[in-house]
């Protein structure tokens, strides 16, 4: 029932919340985008902070 755009940044090696869960979330939400990053785990947004911020800028527009 999420009614706003959702950006999902997922580590492909996440063992706590597997990528398959992210794919389900993306499919179930009306306006979701899933970006997965190889070689990262549960905290992909920290492990690849520069990439995360760049993708946020692209998805949401403006400065991140």
Image: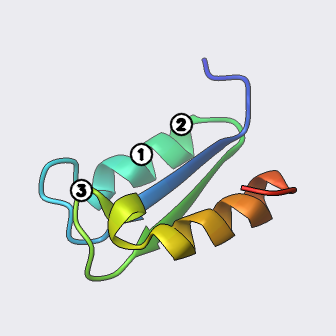
Which numbered tag is attached to residue 24? 1
x, y percent for residue 5: 72, 38
Foreground of the two, 57 or 7: 57
Q: Residue at x 32, y 47 (%)?
A: 21
Which numbered tag is attached to residue 56? none
* Disc 1 to disc 3, C-alpha distance: 17 Å
Query: Label 3 crowding class (10 Å Cα cut-off): few <14, some 14-19, many 20+?
Result: some
Query: Label 1 crowding class (10 Å Cα cut-off): few <14, some 14-19, many 20+?
Result: few
* Disc 1 to disc 2, C-alpha distance: 6 Å
Nearer to us: label 2 or label 3: 3
Which numbered tag is attached to residue 42? 3
Q: Residue at x 53, y 47 (%)?
A: 26
Quadrant in which residue 39 is drawn: bottom left
x, y percent for residue 64: 71, 55
CB of mark 1 within 8 Å of CB of mark 2?
yes
Residue lying farthest top?
1
Query: Label 2 crowding class (10 Å Cα cut-off): few <14, some 14-19, many 20+?
Result: few
Q: Earlier in the sequence, mark 2 or mark 3?
A: 2
Q: Which residue is mark 2?
A: 28
Quadrant in which residue 50 is drawn: bottom right
Q: Secondary structure at mark 3?
A: loop
């Amino acid at each position: 029932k999420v009614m706003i755009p959702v950006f999902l940044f997922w580590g492909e090696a996440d063992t706590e919340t597997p990528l398959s869960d992210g794919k389900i979330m993306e499919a179930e939400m009306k306006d979701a985008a899933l970006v997965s990053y190889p070689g990262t785990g549960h905290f992909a947004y920290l492990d690849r902070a520069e990439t995360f911020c760049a993708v946020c800028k692209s998805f949401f527009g403006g400065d991140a």
